[in-house]
Image: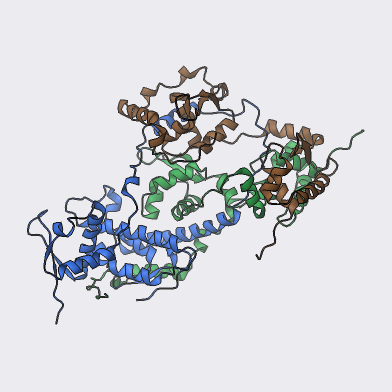
Chain colours: A blue, B brown, C green
Amino acid sequence: MTFESAGRSLADFTVELDVYSGPYEWLLALILKDELEIFEVPLRELVGLYAGSRDPESPNALDRDTDFAGSAAALILLKSRTLSPAVEPEADGEDAVAASPEELAERLQEYLKVRRAAEDLRGRFARAAGHYPSAHVVPPKPGRLRVAEDRVALAARRTFSRLLEPPVRHLGPITVTVQELVGLIRASLLRGPVSFEDLTRNMDRLRSAVAFAAALSLAQEGGVRLLQPEPLGALTLELVEPPR
Amino acid sequence: MSERAPAPEHLLEAVLLVSARPIRPADLASATGLPPEAVETALANLSERYSPETSGVVLRAVAGGYLFSTNPACSVAVERFREEARPAPLSGAAHEVLACALYLGPLTRGAVSRVRGVNSDAVVRNLLERNLLAEAGADRDAPGAPALLAVTDEFLAATDVASREDFPPLDSLVSREELDRVRERLTSPEATSEAPAGPETT
Amino acid sequence: MSERAPAPEHLLEAVLLVSARPIRPADLASATGLPPEAVETALANLSERYSPETSGVVLRAVAGGYLFSTNPACSVAVERFREEARPAPLSGAAHEVLACALYLGPLTRGAVSRVRGVNSDAVVRNLLERNLLAEAGADRDAPGAPALLAVTDEFLAATDVASREDFPPLDSLVSREELDRVRERLTSPEATSEAPAGPETT
C-alpha cells in the first residue's frame, strides 16, 4: 500500500486497500453513502496508513490529525451502529435505495468538483483576508429601510422553536485510540477468551465504546472471534489461532 | 522577512480608515508600532496628501487627534449618495435578534445569545448602528449590569405597523412547551450558559 | 463662478469614504452627477492612487461595485488598533457548502447535504450568521417549501471578486481524466469484490 506525500490537508491522503484505492475523502464519501460496506474497511489498517503518512513537522499537522481523528471516529461510530440490531437506515426514502455504480460515480464526480471548488474558495478567502471597510459610514436617511413584518414573525417562530444542540463539553477530550485498545484486547486474549463485560469493567462509556469498535475491527480482520449465543446476550471474545 | 514592511504613511492611512473618531498620535504610535517621531513625520506627509486642494478625503486635526473626513467641497455628492443609497437588507440573523428584542425584550446581549444558541454580539452591534435596536436601561441584577436592548420606534416605522400589538402574538407562533423552553434559556444564569462565550463587548 | 467644482476623483473619494459596501458605478455617477465615462476614467485614476503598492487604503472592485478597504499588508496595525482578532478562517466544510451554493445554488439545505453526503445544517447556520449565505426564496415544489440558499454580496467581497463570472467554471476544476478514473473505479467489477481478511501488521 502506498500514499502520496502529505500536503495541506487530508485531500492528499491516498489509501490503497483491497476494497478500495484512491483518495481517503472519497472512501469516506463512499462509506457515508452506504456504497461501501463499513465491514470491508479495515480501520486499524487505515489508522496505520495514516500514522505512516504523518509529518509531525508539518505546520498543519494538528489540523490534519484532527481531521483524521474526526473522520476515524465517525467511521467507528458508523461501524458500531451498523452492527447494532434494530437500527433502521435513515428514513430518507430516496437515499435509502442503493444507487447504481453509475449514479454513484456521477454523485462522486460532482462531489469531487465541489471539493475542488472549496479549495479554490479557501485560497480566495485567504488572499482577501485583512481588508477592513471604512468606518466613516453615513447612516441612510431614516425611514428608507423596510422590515417585513412577516419575516420578523417567521424569525420568531424559527428562533423560539429551535432545538439547542446538546452540550458535549462534559465528554471531555478524547484520549483513547483504537490502536491502544486493539493492543489491550490482544493482550487480554493471550490468557484465553474474555467477556466484553470483563474487558470493559473499569472503563468509562467512551472507552468501552471505542473498545467495542476495536473488537469489531479485530473480528472483521479475522484476528478475533466474537461469540454471542443469544441476541443482546453476553459477548465473548476469543483469539483466532493463526493457521499453521 | 521577504516582504517589505509597509511605509509608516500606509499604516496610518489604514488605521485612520477604520476609525470614525479622532485618534491621538500616541494611539497611532501604539497601533502601528512606530516611534512617535515617525508618526509625526508621516502625519505631516499625509496632511499634504489629504488636503482640501488635493483630495476628496481630508485629514483633519481635531480634539487632540487625527481623523479622515470628506472634503466639505464634496458634501453635495455625499448628501445625494446618502439620499439615494439603498440600505443594506437585513440578514436572517438580524431578523432573529429583532424578534428576540420585540417579543422577549428588553433583554441583554447575553440573553439574546442564549435564546438563539449562538453568539449574537456582532449582529446586535450592527442593529444598534442602524438604530433598529437601542439600549434601554441596564439589568441591575446581573453582574456588571449589562445593557438591556429594545426595539426602537424606527424599527416600528420600518415595519409599517402602528404599534407592537400589531405583530402576531407570541403564543400564535410557537407552542406552550417551546415557550417554556425559551423562558428557561432566557433566565438561565450567565455563568452556566451554553451559548458560545464571546468576549462581552460593553 | 467663484469656486471651482471639485475634480471627479475628489467627488468619488468622498463618496467612497462614507460607504462600507461596494458602490456600483451607476450609483457613483448618480451621486456625483458625473457622466458614466467620467466616473470610469476617475475610477481608473483612483485605482492607481489607491493601489496596494502605494497606499494603506486600497480601492477594490468587488461584488459589482467599488469599495475602499484597508491594505491587507497593514492589517496587523488595524487589528491592534481595534483590539479585535481577525475572524477565524472558515472550516473545510464551510468552504464546501459555499461552493455548493455558488455553483449549484440557489439550493435547499437538503440538497447541500445530499451533495456533500453529510448533514450540513449546522454549517449552513454559521454561514447565515456570518452573512456569507442568505435565504433567497423557497423551493415551492418541495414539501414544506424549504428555503433556497444563495451566496451574498458579502461573500463576493470576502473572496475579492467583482462578480460570479470571475470564479472558474465548475467543470474546469477537475480534469476529464480524474473524473473518468472515478467512474472507472466505481463501475469496474473489482470495486465491489469481497474483501479478504486484512494482513496482520503488528
Q: Give residue C148's position: percent from left, percent from top.
A: 45, 42
Which residue: 17% across, 66% down?
A188
Q: For the N terminus of chain B, give its image quadrant.
A: bottom right
| Quadrant position of residue B5 | bottom right
Which residue: 66% across, 66% down?
B2
Q: Give residue A6's position: percent from left, percent from top.
A: 45, 70
Residue A132, visible in the rendered structure: no
Question: Among all residues in the image, which is located at the extreme left?
Answer: A229
Q: Is A71 situated left or right of A216 in this image?
A: right
Between C116 and C75, the residue placed more toward the observer is C75
Vertical placement of residue A30 versus A15, above or below: above
Vertical placement of residue A222 versus B199, above or below: below
Vertical placement of residue B161 versus B40, above or below: above
| Quadrant position of residue C144 | top left
Between B197 and A151, the residue placed more toward the observer is B197
- How many marks on residues? 0
Which residue: 74% across, 43% down?
B25
Question: Among all residues in the image, which is located at the extreme bottom?
Answer: A244
Q: For the C terminus of chain B, give its image quadrant.
A: top right
